[in-house]
């Protein structure tokens, strides 16, 4: 029972981590909270669903397709809502408002295209239940765990070891210095927003699969959870987002299993508040606020 | 190598540079001295493209470069070691140096890293430590090594001696001279005018956004006005 809940918690938590990484990457580089991230996540879920149902594609291809569409949305978001505000000395709240605008636009667009009702993935994708000793794992859970942990590992490696990954970290630390060292920081910023949005879109497909429901409003609650993880993990900290997401997922699953499902969010956010009282800078945040 | 003509740069309504002319011949060390707030850093940032000038020309190796972003002037052969060093504190010493070569695609980057480690043995010792853990002097060495990793033809240094102990300052000036002897042209900004003038060929004196004096470094060092304002009066020899 206990280990079963751990597995369920890890599965849910890994999707939270993936969502939170999107917030974290953008916060790290631009110092802003992208309020449209939840809606990019929702759009990704619909694209994945559409590719599986209408286009009859395999779920892996659908995830890849959602990622590509997510990246494109990211590029558009950056060009339309972030870049125009960057050049001028506008209030740092301006991007918050402009990304809220994009989020409202995307939600309305999804309502128009896909309708308000929740839609499910076909039964063929859900797959069967595997038993490993006392544990029961569905093939969807395995898929979610594999894709999200796989992506997190690749992201970590990419940030640590590759030239572009290092340029991204340098840009996140100090845009002016990165520029001085020869990094085209505008290009890095577009790439970061695209990457964050691509990860968000994949998370959308995975969450859609996990709850077997995809609907235009799904980005709102998930967006808030991702934001909570961003703050809990330490603003802009990649490791923090990964661990924070998993902690939130496990806390939620355990509060349902050993308490009552109606307290699920209360317990989870209660834990976040306790963590923040103990470490106001977040689990992995620097002692002094960075930006 | 570098010619600046009538360069004007503002922050909003404040004109920090009111039309300055500079000339940095290939192979020389030219210093730009002046009090705090005179506009020295603004001049350096405008030259490398971190700030856009309102007016004037910046000609580097015969090419007009005003308005080019900094990442492009690096590729042309200019590197700025910024005021306060600006080490990437969360990246390792090695990563900082690799970032210096971020525009390069040639095969000699590793050779150059080795050369830097030879010149600055302390950086080899600390190569896997985070940049933020180094002392001020070590950070200055790292900032210089990082800038040299771009193989600049013109190295711009903004107050490299700031906040360092006298012994370390002597080391830094020694290194600057060596770099110059190996063929890199240097434009040096300093408040430590005495030391700067000692190693320079030519000097400019900047006051509230205007060049008020320029000439051979030796002549500038003998100028009574300079002695009074920047060399701590005539008492100290
Ligand atoms: N980012 C900025 N915004 C507004 N004013 C600035 C800024 N940076 C510098 N200044 C002003 O421009 C003038 C020149 O500054 P600076 O170039 O940093 O001088 P220096 O390097 O010679 O000490 C000063 O009056 C300073 O207050
Ligand atoms: Mg200065």
Image (spheres, rainbow, N blue to C red):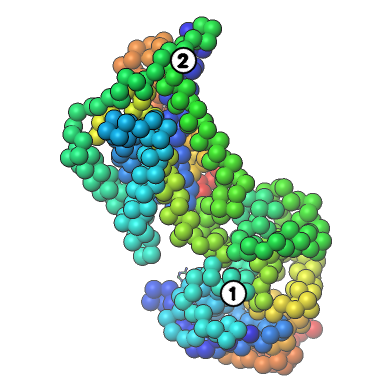
**Quadrant position of residue B167:** bottom right
Q: Does B154 appear above or below B217?
A: above
Q: Residue A116 at what x, y percent from top left?
A: 18, 32
Q: Nearer the viewer, residue B143 or A13?
A: A13
Q: Quadrant of the C terminus of chain B?
A: bottom right
A11 with respect to B75 (left or right): left
Q: Residue at x 42, y 81 (%)?
A: B54
Q: Residue B87 at what x, y percent from top left?
A: 63, 58
Report in which chain the residue with disc 2 lies: A
Q: Residues within 10 Å of mark 2 (few under 14, many from 20)?
A: some
Q: Which mark is residue B76?
A: 1
Q: Residue at x 35, y 32 (%)?
A: A57
Tag nearer the camera, 1 or 2 = 2
Q: Secondary structure at mark 2?
A: strand
Q: Residues within 10 Å of mark 1 (few under 14, many from 20)?
A: some
Residue denoted by label 2: A137
């Amino acid at each position: 029972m206990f280990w079963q809940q751990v597995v369920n918690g890890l599965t849910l938590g890994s999707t939270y981590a993936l969502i939170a990484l999107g917030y974290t990457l953008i916060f790290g580089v631009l110092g802003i909270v992208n309020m449209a991230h939840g809606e990019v996540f929702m759009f990704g879920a619909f694209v994945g669903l559409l590719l599986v149902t209408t286009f009859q594609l395999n779920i892996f291809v659908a995830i890849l397709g959602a990622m590509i569409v997510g990246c494109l949305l990211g590029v558009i978001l950056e060009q339309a809502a972030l870049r125009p505000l960057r050049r001028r000395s506008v209030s740092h709240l301006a991007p918050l408002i402009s990304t809220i605008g994009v989020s409202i636009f995307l939600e309305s667009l999804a309502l128009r295209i896909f309708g308000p009702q929740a839609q499910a993935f076909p039964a063929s994708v859900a797959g069967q239940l595997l038993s490993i000793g006392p544990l029961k794992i569905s093939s969807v859970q395995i898929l979610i765990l594999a894709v999200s942990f796989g992506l997190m590992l690749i992201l970590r490696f990419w940030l640590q070891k590759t030239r572009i990954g290092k340029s991204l970290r340098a840009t996140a630390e100090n845009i002016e210095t990165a520029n001085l060292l020869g990094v085209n920081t505008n290009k890095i910023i577009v790439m970061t927003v695209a990457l964050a949005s691509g990860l968000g879109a994949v998370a959308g497909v995975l969450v859609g699969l996990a709850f077997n429901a995809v609907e235009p409003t799904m980005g709102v609650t998930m967006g808030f959870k991702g934001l909570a993880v961003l703050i809990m993990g330490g603003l802009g900290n990649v490791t923090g987002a990964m661990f924070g997401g998993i902690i939130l997922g496990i806390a939620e699953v355990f509060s349902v299993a050993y308490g009552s499902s109606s307290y699920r969010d209360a317990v989870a956010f209660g834990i976040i508040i306790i963590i923040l009282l103990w470490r106001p800078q977040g689990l992995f945040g620097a002692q002094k606020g960075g930006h | 190598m570098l010619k600046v003509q009538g360069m004007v740069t503002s922050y909003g309504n404040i004109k920090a540079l009111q039309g300055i002319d500079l000339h940095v011949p290939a192979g020389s060390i030219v210093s730009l001295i002046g009090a705090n707030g005179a506009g020295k850093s603004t001049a350096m940032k405008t030259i490398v493209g971190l700030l856009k000038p309102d007016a004037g020309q910046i000609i580097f190796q015969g090419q007009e470069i005003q308005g080019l972003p900094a990442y492009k002037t690096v590729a042309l052969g200019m590197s700025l070691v910024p005021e306060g060093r600006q080490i990437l504190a969360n990246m390792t010493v090695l990563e900082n140096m690799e970032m210096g070569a971020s525009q390069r695609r040639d095969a000699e980057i590793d050779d150059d890293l080795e050369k830097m480690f030879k010149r600055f043995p302390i950086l080899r010792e600390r190569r896997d430590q985070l940049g933020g853990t180094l002392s001020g002097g070590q950070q200055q060495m790292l900032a210089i090594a990082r800038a040299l990793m771009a193989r600049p033809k013109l190295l711009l240094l903004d107050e490299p001696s700031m906040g360092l102990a006298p012994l370390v300052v002597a080391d830094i000036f020694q290194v600057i001279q060596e770099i110059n002897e190996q063929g890199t042209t240097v434009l040096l900004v300093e408040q430590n005018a005495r030391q700067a003038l000692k190693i320079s060929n030519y000097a400019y004196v900047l006051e509230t956004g205007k060049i008020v004096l320029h000439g051979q470094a030796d002549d500038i060092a003998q100028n009574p006005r300079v002695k009074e304002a920047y060399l701590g009066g005539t008492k100290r020899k």
